[in-house]
Image (cartoon, rainbow, N blue to C red):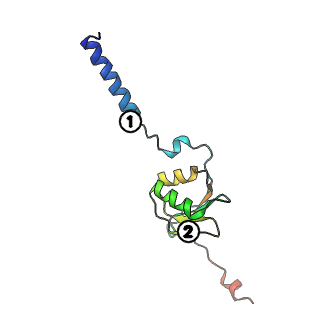
Amino acid sequence: MITPPVNRLLVFCLACATLLIGCRDITDPRAACVNRAPLDGQFDPRAPGYIVIFRDAVPVRTEVNRLAAKYAFTPKFVYESLGGFSAELRPAALSGVRCELSVLHVSHNGIIQLDPLRQAMP
């Protein structure tokens, strides 16, 4: 038979252990990430967001939908021919997406400008 002071101590220890385990964020994608996909480019405030490219043979629409649901973002464009998508990602979502095995690389969105002289040439 357990005496009341020992019983209270046991309950206290179990409560502390439950709080410690419950407070850990086991869904934190950074915790389990070993091979993070590279992040290319630099942030440009005129073109916020990222372009995410998948590995070969990844079903693009299915994977975009899965990642959007998992990391709570809305894709801006889905690029079937390139095998990827663009979206504005919060830091936690960016970290998580980069840790996904389906992701080959991630680039900052950017603005490109064609040379007007080259366009005029036949």
Figure quadrant of residue 122: bottom right
Instruction: Return the residue nearer the eye: 63 or 105.
Output: 63
Instruction: Using a 10 Å C-alpha cutoff, classify the residue at mark 1 as few (fewer than 14 neighbours), some (14 to 19) or many (20 or more).
Output: few
- Which residue bears the numbered disc 1? 22
- Which residue bears the numbered disc 2? 78
Q: Residue at x 54, y 65 (%)?
A: 86
Instruction: Return the residue nearer the eye: 68 or 52.
Output: 68
Q: Position of residue 83 (x, y in %)?
A: 63, 65
Q: Position of residue 12 (x, y in %)?
A: 30, 22
Figure quadrant of residue 63: bottom right
The disc labelled 2 sits on which kind of residue? Val
SS category of the residue bearing label 2:
strand
Q: Residue at x 28, y 16 (%)?
A: 7
The disc labelled 1 sits on which kind of residue? Gly
- Residue 90 visible at all: no
N-term mark: 1 or 2: 1
Instruction: Return the residue nearer the eye: 114 or 39.
Output: 39
